[in-house]
Amino acid sequence: MTIVSRRPRNPSLRFQTFIDTSDLTKKKPEKSLVVGLKKSGGRNAYGRITIRYRGGGAAQKYRMVDFKRTERDIEGKIIAVEYDPNRNTRIALISFLNGAKKYILMPDGLKVGDTVIASATAEAKTGNCLPLKNIPSGFLVHNIEITPGSGGKFARGAGTSAQLVAKSGEHVTLKMPSGEIRMVLGDCWATVGVLSNADFKNISWGKAGRTRHRGFRPHVRGMAMNPVDHPHGGGEGRSKSGSHPMTPWGKGCKGTRTRTRKNPLILKRRKK
C-alpha cells in the first residue's frame, strides 16, 4: 500500500493524497457479519456531549471483527481483504474448516490464500493468535488482551504493534506503541505481527469536506470565544489571562496528568 496523489483537475484535489486500494480484493462486505450503526454525535448513554465537535459524516455499517479469535484450534484461510470504514487498518475475511466465517484485523505481510490459526500450541508466525507466554521474547504483537478472555484491546490501529520485551513469572513485559512499558498476564492472548495500512498517518486530507465526511465538525479555539463560553475567552487582542491551558470546565489539559493512582503493572510511563 502506498500514498497516491491525483492530478489537480480542480483546487480541492491539489493537495489531497489517498491510500492505494489495489490490495483490496472484495468491495461489498460479508452480509452475515454486518450490522447497522447509529451515530452518537459524541454523546454518551445519557445524551450528553462528551466529545465536542462530532456529528454528521457518511453513513456506515459496522463489520463485526472477531477480537477474541473465538475459533480456537481450527485453521482458517484468508479469502478476502476488505476496507473497513470504522477503522484505519484493513480487515481480512477468514473462512474456517468448520464452515464459519470471521473478520480479523489484517496483519502486514499476509495475502489471500494464507492460513492462520488461534491455538495455544500454534507456531508464532504472522497472523497466528496464541497466549503471550507462548510467544518468544522480541516478537511484535497486536490485538492484545488486557485481561484473559476479554478480547484484544491494545495495538489495534493501522501500522501499530507492541514488542514483547521479557517474561517474569506470570507476567510478560510489553513495550506499547505509545512508548509505555507495562506488564500483562502471560495468559492473555495476542496476535503475532504488525497491522497493515501503516501509511494511513501520512494521508493529506486536503480539504475540510473530507474530514466532515468522517464525522468531524469544525473545532473552535477557546481564545476565539467569549468569557462566558471558555476560560480562555475574552480580553483585548490575543490574551489568555495568563492561566494554564484548561478545558471549558476548568480542568487542566495539554500535558496535565490525570491518573490518580499508580498502576504497579506500568513500569515506565508513555512519553508526554
Image (tube, helix red, strand yellow):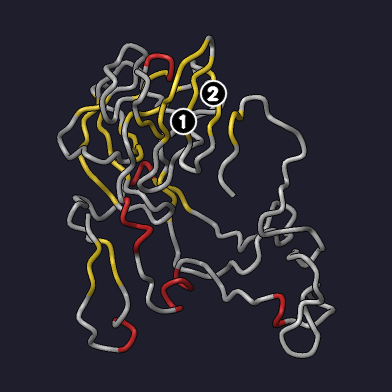
The answer to whether the residues at label 1 and label 2 have Cβ atoms under 8 Å apart is yes
Residue pictured at 54% horizontal, 37% vertical: 180
Residue nearest the observer in this picture, 164 or 216: 164
Occupied quadrant, residue 101: top left
Instruction: State the mark number for residue 156.
Output: none
**Residue at coordinates 24% horizontally, 84% vertically from top-left?**
8
Q: Give the farthest residue toward the left.
A: 113
**Of the residues tagged 1 and 2, which is closer to the observer?**
2
* 20 to the left or right of 54: left
Relative vertical location of residue 226 with respect to residue 69 in this rendering, above or below: below
What residue is shown with label 1?
A: 144
Expressed as whole percent of the image width and height from the top left, the position of residue 50 reads: 70, 58
Residue 211 coordinates in the image, percent (x, y): 46, 71
- Amino acid type at circle 2 is Val
Q: Where's residue 139, x and y in %?
A: 34, 26
Disc 1 and disc 2: Cα gap in Å?
A: 9 Å
Specify which label sits upstream in the sequence, 1 or 2.
1
Q: Residue furthest right?
A: 228
- In front: 198, or 238? 238
